[in-house]
Amino acid sequence: MTVLEQHGAYTPAPPPSWRPRTDPEPLLPDAVPYRVLGLGAMDARAAEQGGRPARGGARPDDELLRRLHTAVVHGRRFNEQATALTKQGRLAVYPSSRGQEACQVGAALALREEDWLFPSYRDTLAAVARGLDPVEVLSLLRGDWHHGYDSRATRVAPLCTPLATQLPHAVGLAHAARLKGDRLAALALVGDGGTSEGDFHEALNFAAVWQAPVVFLVQNNGFAISVPLDKQTAAPSLAHKAVGYGMPGRLVDGNDAAAVHEVLSGALEHARAGGGPTLVEAVTYRLEAHTNADDATRYRADAEVETWRAHDPVTLLERELRERGLLDDRAVREAEEAADRQAAALRDRMNEDPRPDPWELFGHVYAGQTAQLRQQEDQLRAELAAEESAGRAGAGKETR
Ligand SMILES: Cc1ncc(C[n+]2csc(CCOP(=O)(O)OP(=O)(O)O)c2C)c(N)n1
Ligand SMILES: [Mg+2]
């Protein structure tokens, strides 16, 4: 006898406690990435030809465009400087976000002071654009055991290297804030590759079930090291994944700083107001290798990179500002010179040798010291003392 025969006709019905929040339709992302920059010019051309205006049509204010431009110019220069510091042995590794500056800056400027940012290792610019000290932001990539800045004071979690583990942290913080009655949102950044991690699934599921005030920004830069997106997912877009969790998905042009800023500002405000989480996919491209230790020519064609250079986030903003009469050659030069000065200051500070306190190695491992650590600490003390007395003896000989 089968189970069906035993119990009669089986009518599938959801358990009574389960109620889908909405129809799937409003959760679905747009078919094409949302854009803002260049639409004015496209509208003008369309009007000349008697056509319809371009989709969207939002007009960000001039002041915001200027701020975004200054920040992306500084961001690009910062990426160049940090990459140079790896060659000079001053940074252990650097994952450049060249090409992704609009995502980084758009994200940072969409945050309010009370909000939290949960970055990944590639999101140094977002942390710097939020106002953190660049040297502190680079601490981990310099090889320091410490992540460099005070997360509580800055409301920026450590740059996270284990993929997607920052996402459940962001959801936990956002949920706790809601329980405490704090009106804030958490913005968690993750890469396209990170969306294949279990932590991504768990974070989005919890966020939607709890309606936590959190926004997930996937920077889809085409690759997870050498793995292209088509080997990562069979979904129509990464933003579509939102629907399965019961939250809205938004697709945005990740090279368009104004569009990223607008979409994230809206999603963050929705979250702060109690509307729940949003998944935003920003379509962008990593113009450089995964890190300075990677050779991107082994897995992608130069022609592909060139196509994306034509859609460069810095150029897109510059063109828009020039079209609106807000930027001329002199202003561009001034912005670049200011970015050069900041990069030089960063270089000088990074050229100073850090003086780590060796005893910190043992200080924060366990609440109480273990016998093994005590032994290692004694060994190090003896070695340092021997080095110091050898140094004194050497110095003594030289003066004689
Ligand atoms: C849990 C975990 N697995 C594997 C790695 C090794 N790893 C470092 S970066 C990376 C690719 C990540 O790609 P993506 O999420 O697209 O971010 P992107 O580097 O493109 O910004 C991998 C697999 C890791 N850091 N953490
Ligand atoms: Mg990627």
Image: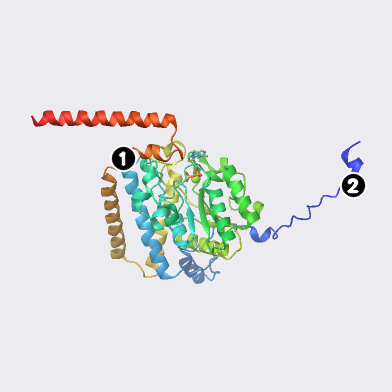
Please identify the quadrant where the N terminus is shown.
Answer: top right
Tell whether 348 sits left or right of 76: left
- Residue to which mark 1 is pinned: 87
Tag of residue 117: none
Numbered disc 1: secondary structure: helix
Other-residue count near label 1 (Cα within 10 Å), few / some / many at <14 / 14–19 / ≥20: few
Coordinates of residue 333 in the picture (x, y in percent): 28, 61
Numbered disc 2: secondary structure: loop
- Residue to which mark 2 is pinned: 9
Depicted 46 relative to depicted 244: above or below = below
Residue visible at 59% across and 42% down in the picture: 198
Residue type at mark 1 is Lys
Depicted 119 relative to depicted 113: above or below = above
Please identify the quadrant where the C terminus is shown.
Answer: top left
Q: Nearer the viewer, residue 84 or 399?
A: 399
Tell whether 360 sits left or right of 7: left
Residue type at mark 2 is Ala
* First in residue order: circle 1 vs circle 2: 2
